[in-house]
Amino acid sequence: MINRRQFLQITGAGAAGLLTGSMTSLISAGRANAAEPGSSGFAPDLDIDLKAAADTIPILPGDPTGVWRFQGRMTKGDRASLVDIERSYLGPIIRARRGQKVRIRFTNEIADQTIVHWHGLHVPADMDGHPRLVIPRGETYVYEFEVRNRAGTYWYHPHPHGLTGPQVYGGLAGLFLVSDDEEEAAGLPSGEHDIPLVLQDRAFDRHNQLVYQSGHHMEQMNGFLGDWILVNGHPDFSLPVATRAYRLRLLNGSNARIYKLAWKDGNPLTVIGTDGGLLEKPVQRPYVMLGPGERLELWADFSSYEVGSGTELVSLPFDGGMLGGGRMGRGMMGGGGYVLANGAGFPVFKVKVNRHESETSTLPQRLSTIQRYDPADAINRENPKRFHLVMRHMAWTINGRTFQMEQVASDERVALNSLEVWEFINEGGGRGMMGGMDMPHPIHLHGMQFQVLQRRGVSHQGYVDEGWKDTVLLMPGERVRLLVRFGDYPGLYLYHCHNLEHEDLGMMRNFLVEETTSAA
Ligand SMILES: [Cu+2]
């Protein structure tokens, strides 16, 4: 199966050649987006040079793997604000405090055009990494923004139209962690006891090189699924811990894989945070469904474990709704199939208790304050904007539409600072010739954190909707209503499916935040 796919040409002509859309590399006369940094009077607390470049790194035993990698360098600010993950292709962890001003000079050194999106951050439209802002190789885009988000686990990744899937897959992703006073007051485990865990899946050829899709339409329609589960870029990941409590920050950085996360020993997950930071109080779940782009923060207390024992975080089996029927993917229409289908069960990482620590921290019952939106304040409470996630003409669409770079439909215009109800509906288009036509879709809104108002059609216990979200998973048959305030910044933003192959195929649209004096 794997030999039907093509190698990801990391050092060659780039990812564009792999895609069916025949998007070509734009190595043309460039343009700079901004005047000389500093000329605007922006005085950054953190000043970072960030580049995307080809590199090689050992992942599996044997040959090193060609990857693309974000590499960063602090030019101003606390050195602890930029932290490399050891021996990983992942980009450096950027750590900022709420209220800090950040400048990031991003230089593209890969063959294809690209741009960086700060997933979950509330930034001005021209700082958000919209695909219209792509830069070719050799160019630099200067980001300048103030960190206005609450403390939380955010991340960054490329966002060029049609190429996000292969670029993220090639290694371009990193965490952006925000801290603030409220989080500090909660007294959660910190330092080495606050552990980020990025979950991704990859496929390798015999020479340890990454393989991506063949460009076959059915593979794109399902989204890429690898048979190796990597944590922070490492296979067979094992987390050494002491007999104490930890804060575990999980990011699903996979292109298309959904995780149904649970402890192998049957203990419930204690959830303390979601996409937009800490919950008001901890909640327990038997398992949590984590779609691509979503984050989950866990309180994990190993104080009752014996040194030498351990546990495992696993992904439980579920109906992953893959096209072509078969859970093992054998029935796919010539597309190759997957060794590890979406919905297959597998271990994610092992926890090994290797030392005793007498520290006993207790789980805070109060984590943060979340100001609830009042649905009565929404300008369209009785008339939600409805977005149907449907397949049309063998393409995934939102209300039958696919992405057009600058296009905005009338129901995609919103007034600055207004609160709206948006409803996403994943009830599919019935049954087609390929069997089930329904698939999960993780929906992401750029620039805004939102609240989940209501869900319908949900037949599992795997969602954590108590906190702020920027990405919301819809399994087949489900619908969700969101309360979104389009605050502070006018301009063009995106909403899209975060299955990156769906996104690259056009399951993405603009929304326009308009300044208007008549806003309610
Ligand atoms: Cu999708």
Image (spheres, rainbow, N blue to C red):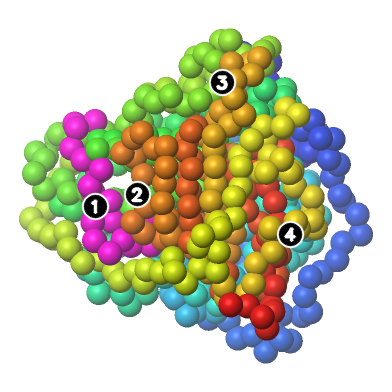
Q: CA distance from mark 1 to mark 3?
A: 34 Å
Image depth: mark 4 or mark 2 in front? 4
Judge whether residue 79 can be spotted in this image.
no
Q: To which residue does mark 2 refer?
A: 464
- Secondary structure of the residue carrying numbered label 1: strand
Classify mark 1: residues with Cα within 10 Å, few (<14), some (14-19) or many (20+).
Answer: some
Which comes sooner in the sequence, label 4 or label 2?
4
Looking at the picture, which amino acid does disc 2 mark?
Answer: Val
> Which corner quadrant of the figure contains ligand 1?
top right
Tell me which residue sits at (79%, 79%) in the image: 35
Image depth: mark 4 or mark 1 in front? 4
Per the rendering, the mark at residue 436 is 3
Q: Position of residue 154 (x, y in %)?
A: 48, 59
Q: To which residue does mark 1 refer?
A: 283
Image depth: mark 4 or mark 3 in front? 4
Tell me which residue sits at (19%, 31%) in the image: 265
- Secondary structure of the residue carrying numbered label 2: loop
Q: CA distance from mark 2 to mark 3?
A: 27 Å
Q: To which residue does mark 4 refer?
A: 410
Classify mark 4: residues with Cα within 10 Å, few (<14), some (14-19) or many (20+).
Answer: few
The magenta stretch spans residue 111: no
Which comes sooner in the sequence, label 2 or label 3?
3
Looking at the image, do the residues carrying marks 2 and 1 touch, with CB atoms under 8 Å apart?
A: yes
Q: Is the distance from the Cβ of mark 3 to the nearest ligand 1 atom less than 8 Å?
A: no
